[in-house]
Amino acid sequence: MKNLRNKLIGLIQAVNRYPLTMLFLLAIATVNVNMINNETEDYLKYLFTFIIGALLSVIGQQVYERFFIKVIERAVLMFGSVLLTAGYYFVIQSAPTFSIEISTKTSISIFALMVAFIWIPAIKSKVTFNESFMSAFKAFFLTVLFSSVLAAGLNLIIIAIDQLLFSLDFKTNAHVLNIVFSLFAPIFFLSYTPPYPGKKDRNRPTNELGGEWEKVEKAITCPKTLGILVSFIIIPLTAVYTIILLAYTILNIRGDFWTNNLLEPMLVSYAVTVILVYILSSHLEDKFAILFRKIFPKILIPIVLFQTVASILKISDIGITYGRYYAIMFGIFALIAGIVFSFLPVKRNGLIASVIIVLSAISIIPPVDAFTVAKVSQVNLLKRTLVENDMFQNGKVVPNPDISIDDKKTITRTASYLNNLNYLAEIDWLPEKLFNVDNFNKTFGFEETYNQPSDRTEGKFAHIDWERSPAVDIKNYDQMIHLYFQGSQTDLKIPLEIDNKTYTLKNDSRNLIFMDEQNKELFRFDMKKAIDQIFENHPGTNSGKNMLTTEELMVTQENDKVKMTILATSVDNYGSQYNADIFVFLKIK
């Protein structure tokens, strides 16, 4: 009972300690409630904005406790957190959808803020970065354990009530999990964050800090079980992995070794493992841990150099992508980490946190961010390939089917990359809908050419033959909509008015979604299933030459509220990518 009472007091203290964070967490929970009820992605921008705000407010409180005393200073830091959060929202609000670029930059920002959360207690402090990391590491896994047990228990209670007493809405469990993971878990984690020594404690001896310093020591001390796990299991396994990696490198170091796709992920995973194990073992004094700290950071340096060189060599062939950019950035970070671990004392390990934060900021701030650099690189590579094949003249692309397979692959790969990130609209010498129907062939003079098997490169096509069936009966439908469905895009939103009621037709990567005035989903038309059905019923369309009638290109799906039929005037499929120029016929039952 005493332990339970202390834990409840800790939760209450965490709420009082982080009031602005609590407001952001409540906002996150509220957004999740709307997303659960409406099943729409419209709230994603708000969700990630509030997550960023929660992290900024936590860091603001950490900074206040460490370096300030006055209440007005705390208020300024809170205001700064709100201001930065608002700035993030206005940056992403201008984008039509929550794109790959925005989601990646947001993820990097969240990661950098988490690193800052761990690093701040170690700045000019008797607490080292490794000790602060240990505190966060323990708090994280305790939070996962408690939250998972609580979620499982509540789920069983909901099932029991639903099965034995009375029926519950199927979304009840989602709402309960929202409370557990949006509110309880973050507060529980913060309750394990001790009050690290700050400016107010600068002139106080350790013995006067009393219970506060005891909490810090308890938080930063490595548990005996974790120490055994690291020293006698993780470190030996890492040593074996190192031997295998070095043997592979020595036996295969030749020309194609440097561009081998297997090399880069192996080296990156090894570097991540060594850095994490080094931090966790930094205060262990057994022979395994001491030997690991002396040897492995020095092995890390040449390994990371291999990884970075391999990543750079690939640029000449495929240009810079945002993934390659981050691989090189990680190589730079891991190289610096290896040097810090090898030649500087443990108390200076906080340098790697500052390096992470600086590199993360560089990678998300234009014009040197990952996506801007990658876009420029891919456009230049595409343009250079076209020029080398006399396909770019007077600012226009000239089709040329008689170029090498490698150049066709390069053109396809770069154009596909630019299309997937929605950059084609910014290139005036390429059509915005380059991958619609046969636009790619018309533009470059050949079909898309990939490294995948032939069924992917050849693709599947179907086109309507209006001459054989020029009329379509639509008397049993309320409305007709013409649109182009592209599986890689999710920015479709068409307002409709039927019988003086307002509806919306939108899409995700696989479905057309019909919603009412309250954004409640009424019907979901499975486009992938419909397109697969067309090709399964008419396998001859794989050649792209057969023209089908309207009846052969019509697919109907319905439920008790809505009937929806599509008529595809043209449809194509490349692997998992589905595109179709369609008429949609709607009937409200």
Image: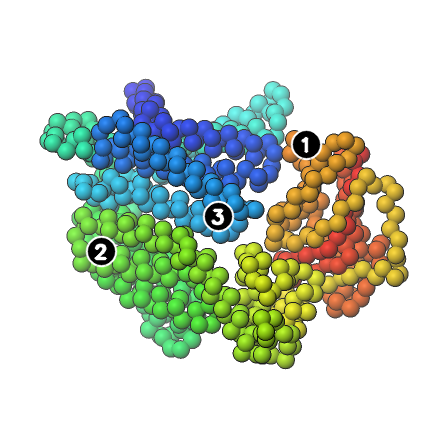
Question: How many residues crowd around disc 3 within 10 Å: few (fewer than 14), some, or many (20 or more)?
Answer: some
Instruction: Locate residue 93, reporting x and y percent.
Output: 51, 42
In the rendered image, which residue does mark 3 sit on?
103
Q: What SS does tag 3 mark?
A: helix
Q: Is the C-beta separation of discs 3 and 2 under 8 Å?
A: no
Q: Which of 18 and 450 is in front in this view?
A: 18
**Kind of residue at disc 1:** Glu
What residue is shown at x 43% (from left), y 41% (from top)? 87
Vertical side of 343 occupied by 400: above or below: below
Tell me: 110 left or right of 100: left
- Where does the N terminus fall, quadrant-wise? top left
> Which residue in the rendered view is the most extreme toward the front?
394
Vertical side of 323 occupied by 85: above or below: above
Question: How many residues crowd around disc 2 within 10 Å: few (fewer than 14), some, or many (20 or more)?
Answer: many
Q: Which mark is residue 250?
A: none
Q: Earlier in the sequence, mark 1 or mark 2?
A: 2
What residue is shown at x 43% (from left), y 37% (from top)? 86
In the rendered image, which residue does mark 1 sit on?
517
Q: Quadrant of residue 515?
A: top right
Vertical side of 255 occupied by 175: above or below: above
Instruction: Locate residue 550, reporting x and y percent.
Output: 84, 55
Distance in Å between CA atoms under marks 1 and 2: 59 Å
In the rendered image, which residue does mark 2 sit on?
341
Q: Which of marks 1 and 3 is nearer the N terminus?
A: 3
Q: Nearer the viewer, residue 441 or 289?
A: 441
Foreground tag (1 vs 3): 1
